[in-house]
Image (cartoon, helix red, strand yellow):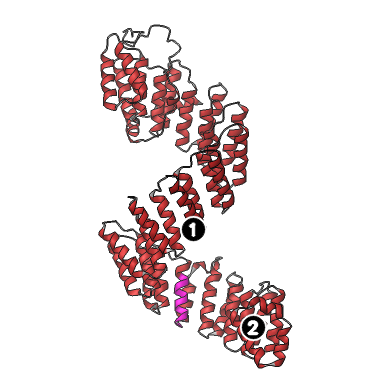
């Protein structure tokens, strides 16, 4: 099977392969683990090149020098090329070992195309490669994302009578994994394990890493079990990969089990392992466990790095726990760890969302003082916070400062200011900024359109909103529920029920799960506009569309009936609602009781209040106020209310 792969790969044209090689990029080579080059099985005999020239066995002084420089890791590409060219011209010809040192050094410099150019020169002067040479070339192919060409060189190993070693196998496995062909890498691994070539902790680790990146954690755990069974040493890096993958998949219990297994095996967790677990707990909102691990980490005298602090700060901020995030931030600074732009931005964004602008601005000033240049996201967060607390003028100044600094504003920056203007009822300024954004070649997002359409509808400018909606349909992003919701709400509010019905009719999604929400909007709008008959018809129409009315549907209808003085009919609908399996909520009861009290149906209201109490619902402020007024005016009502003292005390 492998020779078949090698032959098919080798048959591809050399010119296309070289072209592919020039384009690639890669990671570190497995050969960094080896300190000295391998020799082939015939290394005890005197090497002879293809032109019949004997290569000397004892290295010259110059060769020793070149090997030393290569081993130091400080060699530069131009020097490597110069040494190589001189070695090629040496007589007698140097042994392939010295050339391998140079090729390996150039490979470690990630100059993979130069390795192949050097190899071509070796061929031209008749210097034969050994297994180590071919392994270097395979590594270059894999790092250049042309692993299939690497299999061609694998075939060359067999053709020259060499036995592939663990580095050969490991390099090809890594190349396949980097190419996303992890399952094929496993097939290669299994095939070569039969020949006792593949069982190495490095190769196991490569496969585990590949499966983790493919989110196939089950396979990764299987490889881990095989690794332990094969008595290969499992190191902290391998455990770290599995724990990180489990945490990212939300499998924190399994991650902790692996963590315990790791400690029982005598392997000490490092900062990366702890950071993964802390992130896992934070993602699930389990901050006590996250902090406990953090303290345990400090207790073990493991240096907490910036990534760990950022993980913990981000976790707290995601849950709005800005005080805890600030404490961790101050602790980090106290430990002498300098916050980066990401750290500052995470904290500033959280503080701004919570409306803590004094604290956010303080962190922002500290950021600038420490020489950290805020990015677009940082500026947008501060602008959003200023808009949130009504400081639109300050947000405008910051926006203009970004322009003056020459920052290339993105859609997010514009959306923040558009939203700020809309919240302050400055729809003209919002439209102007929307148009400016388009003129600068930025495409408005669904958020841009939805914000502006919603604000225009709220301001009664439904025609302008509808025009913007048409533009969105023709050349913008696809309208989403929030778009239709804003427009339907605006049309209904302005009494344009016919237009709202036409819009609803045009929606293909009215038969989907979100369709009931559109019907709810329309029914609510009709009820508020006093068009109860049309609302009733729409309520009946819901079932024919394959939908089921929910509590919001009924609440809108009940509210409409009560406001029209039809509370008894509303009571009937409340009972029908329950009979059809839709249980009334607190809002249903409060609407109904208010309606009954307005119509002086005190006894019915009290009966409903008792039902409400038994279902553990509380009356709202409006109902409580109405009940107190009723009790003051009517002795009988006062006596009835006294039968529910605990209930009313709880609600007040």
- Secondary structure beneath dot 1 equals helix
Q: Which mark is residue 460?
A: none
Query: Do labels 1 and 2 touch, CB within 8 Å?
Result: no
Q: Which quadrant is the C terminus positioned in?
A: bottom right
Residue that numbered label 2 is attached to: 593
Q: Is residue 589 visible?
A: yes
- The location of residue 456, given as percent across then percent down, is 39, 75
Question: Residue at 29% of width from left, 66% of height from top?
Answer: 436
- The location of residue 411, given as percent across then percent down, is 35, 60
Magenta-highlighted stretch: main secondary structure?
helix
Q: Earlier in the sequence, mark 1 or mark 2?
A: 1
193 vs 102, nearest the viewer:
102
Badge nearest the viewer, 1 or 2: 1
Mark-to-mark CA distance, 1 and 2: 41 Å
Picture quadrant where residue 479 is located: bottom left
Question: Residue at 46% of width from left, 70% of height from top?
Answer: 484
| Range of magenta residues | 484-495
Pointer 1 local density, CA inside 10 Å: few below 14, some 14–19, many at least 20: many
Vertically, is 50 above or below 649? above
282 vs 439, nearest the viewer:
282
Judge left or right: residue 388 versus residue 18.
right
Residue that numbered label 1 is attached to: 322
Vertically, is 354 above or below 198? below
Judge left or right: residue 458 versus residue 591.
left
- The location of residue 57, given as percent across then percent down, is 36, 8
Is residue 2 located in the magenta-colored stretch of the structure? no
Is residue 489 located in the magenta-colored stretch of the structure? yes
Pointer 2 local density, CA inside 10 Å: few below 14, some 14–19, many at least 20: many
- Secondary structure beneath dot 2 equals helix
- The location of residue 196, given as percent across then percent down, is 56, 21
């Amino acid at each position: 099977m492998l020779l078949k792969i090698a032959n098919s790969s080798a048959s591809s044209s050399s010119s296309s392969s070289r072209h592919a090689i020039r384009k690639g990029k890669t990671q570190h080579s497995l050969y960094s683990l080896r300190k000295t080059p391998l020799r082939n099985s015939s290394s005890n005999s005197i090497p002879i090149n293809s032109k019949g020239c004997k290569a000397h066995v004892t290295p010259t002084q110059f060769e020793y020098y070149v090997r030393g420089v290569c081993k130091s890791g400080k060699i530069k590409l131009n020097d490597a090329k110069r040494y190589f060219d001189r070695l090629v011209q040496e007589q007698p010809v140097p042994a392939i070992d010295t050339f391998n040192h140079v090729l390996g050094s150039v490979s470690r410099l990630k100059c993979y195309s130069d390795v192949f150019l050097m190899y071509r020169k070796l061929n031209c002067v008749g210097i034969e490669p050994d297994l180590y040479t071919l392994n270097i070339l395979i590594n270059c192919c894999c790092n250049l994302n042309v692993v299939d060409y690497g299999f061609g060189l694998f075939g060359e190993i067999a053709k020259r009578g060499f036995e592939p070693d663990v580095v050969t196998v490991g390099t090809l496995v890594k190349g396949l994994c980097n190419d996303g062909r992890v399952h094929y890498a496993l097939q290669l691994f299994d095939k070569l394990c039969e020949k006792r070539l593949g069982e190495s902790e490095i190769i196991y680790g490569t496969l585990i890493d590949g499966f983790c990146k493919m989110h196939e954690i089950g396979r990764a755990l299987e490889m881990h079990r095989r690794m332990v069974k094969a008595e290969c040493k499992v190191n902290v890096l391998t455990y770290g990969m599995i724990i990180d993958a489990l945490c990212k998949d939300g499998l924190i219990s399994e991650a902790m089990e692996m963590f315990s297994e790791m400690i029982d095996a005598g392997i000490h967790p490092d900062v990366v392992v702890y950071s993964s677990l802390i992130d896992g707990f934070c993602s699930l909102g389990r901050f006590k466990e996250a902090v406990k691990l953090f303290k345990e980490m400090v207790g073990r005298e493991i240096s907490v790095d910036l990534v760990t602090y950022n993980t913990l700060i981000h976790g707290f901020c995601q849950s709005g726990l800005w005080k805890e995030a600030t404490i961790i931030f101050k602790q980090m600074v106290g430990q002498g760890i300098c916050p980066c732009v990401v750290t500052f931005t995470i904290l500033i964004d959280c503080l701004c969302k919570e409306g803590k602008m004094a604290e956010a601005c303080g962190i922002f000033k500290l950021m600038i003082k420490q020489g950290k240049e805020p990015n677009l996201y940082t500026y947008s967060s501060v602008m959003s916070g200023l808009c949130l607390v009504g400081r639109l003028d300050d947000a405008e100044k910051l926006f203009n400062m970004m322009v003056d600094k020459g920052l290339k504003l993105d859609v997010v920056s514009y959306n923040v200011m558009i939203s700020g203007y809309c919240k302050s009822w400055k729809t003209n300024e919002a439209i102007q900024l929307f148009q400016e954004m388009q003129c600068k070649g930025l495409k408005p997002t669904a958020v841009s359109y939805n914000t502006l359409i919603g604000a225009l509808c709220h301001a009664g400018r439904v025609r302008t909103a509808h025009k913007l909606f048409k533009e969105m349909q023709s050349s913008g992003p696809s309208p989403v529920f929030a778009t239709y919701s804003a427009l339907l709400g605006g049309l209904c509010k302005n009494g344009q029920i016919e237009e709202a019905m036409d819009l609803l009719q045009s929606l293909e999604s009215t038969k989907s799960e979100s369709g009931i929400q559109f019907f709810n909007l329309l029914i609510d709008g009709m009820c508020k506009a006093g068009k109860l008959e049309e609302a009733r018809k729409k309520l009946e129409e819901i079932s024919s569309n394959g939908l089921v009315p929910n509590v919001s549907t009924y609440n809108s209808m009940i509210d409409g009936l009560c406001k029209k003085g039809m509370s008894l009919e509303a009571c009937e609908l409340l009972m029908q609602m329950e009979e059809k399996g839709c249980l009334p909520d607190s809002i249903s009861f409060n609407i109904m009781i208010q309606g009954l009290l307005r119509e002086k149906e005190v006894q019915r209201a009290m009966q409903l209040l008792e039902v409400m109490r038994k279902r553990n619902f509380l009356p709202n402020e409006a109902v409580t106020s109405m009940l107190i007024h009723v009790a003051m005016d009517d002795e009988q009502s006062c006596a009835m209310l006294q039968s529910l003292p605990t209930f009313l005390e709880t609600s007040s």
